Image (tube, grey):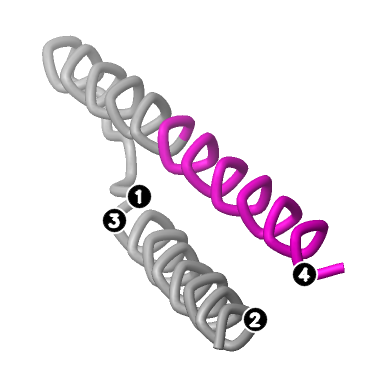
Amino acid sequence: MQSALLILLLCAATDLIACGLLLIVVWVEHRRVRKEAAIVGESVPSAAGQFGCLIAFGLISLVVIYGAVWLLLR
């Protein structure tokens, strides 16, 4: 039972890493769009608040995953 839970937690950590990589790709693309809009003279609102919220939720998720692993391996 413990090994199945550990595998599940490893899958959750892998999923979280994949979501982080996706966030990085979206952030880079958003910066590119903002630069292109600045060249043309258009205005694109900043997404710093949304990215900050996503990063905070990601960090909270990491803490929860590591806490669950720590409790299972005790």
Nearer the camera: disc 2 or disc 1: 2
* Disc 1 element: loop
Residue pointed to by mark 1: 47
Q: Magenta span has 2?
A: yes
Point out which mark residue 2 bears.
4
Question: Which three-letter amino acid code belongs to the residue tagged 2?
Answer: Leu
Q: Which of marks 2 and 1 is nearer the N terminus?
A: 1
Point out which mark residue 72 bears.
2
* Disc 3 element: helix
* Quadrant where the image shows the C terminus: bottom right
* Cα–Cα gap, marks 3 and 2: 36 Å
Query: Can you tell which quarter of the image residue 63 is in?
Result: bottom left
Residue pointed to by mark 3: 48
Q: Which of marks 3 and 4 is nearer the N terminus?
A: 4
Question: Which three-letter amino acid code belongs to the residue tagged 1?
Answer: Ala
* Cα–Cα gap, marks 1 and 4: 41 Å
Question: Which three-letter amino acid code belongs to the residue tagged 4?
Answer: Gln
* Cα–Cα gap, marks 2 and 1: 38 Å
Query: Can you tell which quarter of the image residue 38 is in?
Result: top left
Toward the left, the furthest residue is: 39
Q: Residue at x 30, y 19 (%)?
A: 33
Image position, residue 4 (x, y; %): 82, 57
Q: Which residue is drawn at 53% across and 41% down?
A: 19
* Cα–Cα gap, marks 2 and 4: 7 Å
Query: Can you tell which quarter of the image residue 40 is in?
Result: top left
Give left or right: position of 5 versus 12: right
Label 3 crowd (10 A; few <14 / some 14-19 / many >=20): few
* Residue interval drawn in magenta: 1-22
Give left or right: position of 8 versus 40: right
Label 2 crowd (10 A; few <14 / some 14-19 / many >=20): few
